[in-house]
Image (spheres, rainbow, N blue to C red):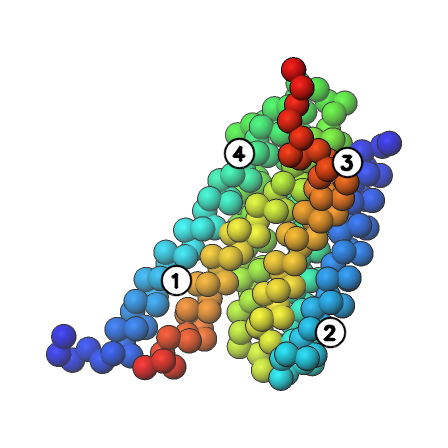
Amino acid sequence: MDPRAQIQQDFVKIIKGMILGNVVLIVIGAFFIEEAMAFTLGLILGSVIAVLNMRLLYLTLNRAVTMSFRRAQIFTVSRYILRYIIIGIVVYASLTADHLHPLGTILGLLLIKPVILATQLFEDKAFLKNVFVRKKD
Amino acid sequence: MEGITSEALVLAASAIGAGLAMIAGIGAGIGQGYAAGKGAESVGRQPEAQGDIVRTMLLGAAVAETTGIYGLIIALVLLFVNPLVGML
């Protein structure tokens, strides 16, 4: 399979996982959090920013691999700082705005990690089955 | 300790804590830069594997980046909605 198509497929999988995770968290939030609407808005904002950040990361890495070692390092770190500032602005906005629940935004931003692990690492059942099986010499 | 209120002390300690929490972001940045540099080297050695290299690096970097976000969130919470001040 073409690697570029595979990356697109990974993105689709991750977005689907994020939507599923959002639905689960919104249902949990509706029961346990007083400001459910603010929590939902925060969660959606956090998730959208997390996915857009990943897209930005993809564009950065795609360009970085065509550079020399030193230039790729500097370019990636500078873009990382840019993404970090964007996340900082989003978290600051959710902390100060009344209609956004900070917990929702934070969960939305961090949801991408379990989603990636679930869709890419733990989806292979054969791998999970053989994790504790000792290799034969 | 005369002249320093307990609230001022907590705020000062929170500011120091926020600064310390931001150190978490440095590690992720250095790691990501190093990985990208090594990825560029690998693509130079084997250009036909660029797609696979970028794919693997993308997933790894995205997972690593959330670690930096933890520190940023702690720092911003300590600075802007300090829960410790309310405990006084």
Marks 2 and 4 belong to one chain: no
Relative horizontal placement of residue B39, taking residue B22 as reference (left or right): right
Marks 1 and 4 belong to one chain: yes
**Does the CB distance between marks 2 and 4 fall below 8 Å?**
no
Counting residues from the N terminus, which is met first, the one under dot 2 or under dot 3?
A: 2
Mark 1–mark 2 distance (CA, rounded to whole Å): 32 Å
Quarter-of-image position of residue A46: bottom right
Circle 1 sits on which residue?
Answer: B18
Tell me the kind of residue under disc 1: Ala
Mark 1–mark 3 distance (CA, rounded to whole Å): 43 Å
In terms of secondary structure, where does tag 4 sit? Answer: helix
Tell me the kind of residue under disc 4: Tyr
Residue at point 47% right, 50% down?
B25
Counting residues from the N terminus, which is met first, the one under dot 1 or under dot 4?
A: 1
Residue at point 66% right, 35% down?
A131
In terms of secondary structure, where does tag 1 sit? Answer: helix
In terms of secondary structure, where does tag 3 sit? Answer: helix
Q: Which of marks 4 and 3 is in front?
A: 3
Circle 4 sits on which residue?
Answer: B34
Q: Is residue A58 visible?
A: no
In the image, residue A20 lies at what x, y percent? Answer: 77, 62
Mark 1–mark 4 distance (CA, rounded to whole Å): 26 Å
Circle 3 sits on which residue?
Answer: A126
Q: Which chain carries label 4?
A: B
Mark 2–mark 3 distance (CA, rounded to whole Å): 32 Å
